[in-house]
Amino acid sequence: MEVASELSPKQLTHTLQGLSRSQLDAEPLLPALKRRAQQLAHVLFGTHAVTVLVALSDAQQLDHQILKTLSETILRHLDRLSAQDYIAVLSTLSRNPELRSALPVSCVEELLQALRSRGYGPWRLELEAVVHLLEALHGLRLEDEVLLELLLDRLPAAMRLSDLSLTLLLRFLEALADLPKRSRAQVAAHLHRRRKLQNALKESLYKQVTSKNLDLEAQVVIAKAIARLGYEEPLTQEFLERLTYSPQLPTLSLDTACDLCFTLAQQSWQIEWNRRFAWKVLHALYGVEIPQALQDDEPLALAVKVNPVEPGSLLRLAWALAVLDEALPLPLLEQLADLPLPRDWGGYGLKQLQEVALHHQLQAKLNKESVPCKVKEWMELVLEVPREDQYVPQQPRRAERNRKQISAARYSYETWLTVTLSQLHLPHQAQQVVGCHRVPITFKRQLHLIDVLSLEDLTVPAGRITGSAELRRRQLMQLGWAMHSIKLSELYEAARTGTLRLVVSKLVSSLDETAASGGFAEPMLRKKVPQVRPLNRPMRIQSQADDEFLDSDGEDFSSVPCGKDPRLVLRQRAHHVLQAGKNQEAAFELPLSTNMGWVNFPMRGCPNYARQKNYFM
């Protein structure tokens, strides 16, 4: 205790670091070391302050006062720290959310800005540092497009250079899968566009699956992480096939069995086997009777756990049943109703819960089943909870001549569609929520919609539609909407080649047969000369289909007079005045006479040609 008050800054740092790594029980010594760190805060270097902060956090000795003191010291020496120090501080702050109020106002933002300035350093080749940063952003609930783009840019090299363990690989896959929707779309764009990233991920998975003797529990965990990321190829398909024929299936825990049902449903693989297996899991959980059509000669006695099944596993099982279009048993719904709403950062738990509630509502309405009041009120409450991904508008990439800052590729397909439909004069609604799903374009009166299969809806590199996309499309059709589906790659190619109006007009041609007629191709070269219009332009005939496109909820457009083009009216008036002036000139023009001594010249500059002057010779 007395020695602690005489330690120098360097000795204090090494002492705390040694106690943290050795995990020794030093309860009486740690408070004295914390007081000494408080006294030496004004002379600590930045690296020493980072080491003390991490060591005190590992020893659970952080409080508001010491955190505020150390964070101010770190901010004073921010320009002298390395990128690894920034990541260590962010990771420590993410693990202590209750102490975040003691931080300076701009502490986290200054750390992120300093890390962006070091974005091109060698730290991106360390996969462990990448995982720590992703987990820190998840804990702080911060979304950074620039940092994520910097990480993904060097990710193939980092995966090849790092000595990947199974734990590190699973942490990395889970960190990517837990990102919010906008960041997930950024990751999906890299996976679909970069063959090097696909090969690096394939090599890492091949090493973990084939080189180690993994039990069935670990294999299911790997398969679930792959399914959440949307990765699928012949290797993963063969891996899933082996899981369904494994002799260790009866030894699975109920949590792992629920995860296996979710994995197969998300990948749309072995659908019939997954349907039978899901009912066996329900039978083991609640004792429900398996339907006669799904019974087989392979009994499956799952190992029942003493502890209850985790809420996340129950939700994934219910979601898998919704994807398989199976009825949800009442005990499962009652157990879900007793659980709190999911509060994950990405919002995927709430989205899955809303899809489960909508699925049961549609099934109950179709089969005319009675639902208990508790479950019915719970479903209505779940569907009323707003999600961030339903209302955040898509932001197109800002146009810049010389881009100096790295940024992600953005595919604002909702903006492409609504601008094109406006050019085609088709009334529509953009970015609408139908049920619990966000729809790019809707035509309310006709009950038609345009659904875009984004990069997250397709597996990579196989290109198959995921189970979540299939569930969305089926529920939209069950709600009574006619669907016009198109892939994002086709829409992007049309926008790139200038044929977007042609593609969209053919897509919605079932609404109006005349929509697909005519040339809608965008000109490749735009001339700067003004377009020449004829004076006697024929009036445009309104088609009968235009009235059908008008929304019933909007204003009554039938009583509004269709005004003419002002430029056309002025040109017609000038044309009539010109003809009248020529006729008047022909009637009153006199021959040239030297006896009278004057000549009659009409004034061409006058608008009505009626004013004349006498010029004496």
Image (cartoon, rainbow, N blue to C red):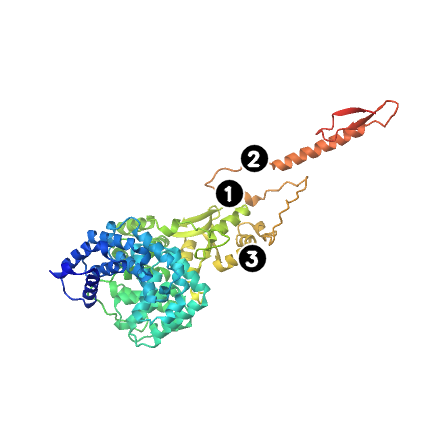
Task: Report the residue marked by disc 2.
Answer: 561
Q: Secondary structure at mark 3?
A: helix
Residue type at the position of mark 3: Thr
Q: Which residue is mark 3?
A: 497
Q: Are marks 3 and 2 in contact (CB under 8 Å)?
A: no
Considering only order in the chain, which callout, 2 or 3, is on the residue closer to the N terminus? 3
Viewer-proximal residue among 11 and 235: 11
- What residue is disc 1 on? 550
Which of the two marks, 3 or 1, is nearer to us in this view?
A: 3
Question: In the rendered view, does 266 fall on the left or right side of 594?
Answer: left
| CB contact under 8 Å: marks 2 and 1 | no
| Disc marking residue 103 | none
Which label sits in the foreground, 3 or 2?
A: 3
Q: Depth check: 125 or 458 in front?
A: 125
Q: Horizontal and vertical percent for residue 495?
A: 53, 55
- Circle nearer the N terminus (3, 1): 3
Q: Quadrant of residue 297?
A: bottom left
Q: Position of residue 589 (x, y in %)?
A: 81, 28
- Label 3: how many Cα within 10 Å (few below 14, some 14–19, many 20+): few
SS at badge 2: loop
What kind of residue is marked 2?
Answer: Pro
Residue at (46, 64) in percent of width and height: 193
Q: Is residue 224 visible?
A: no
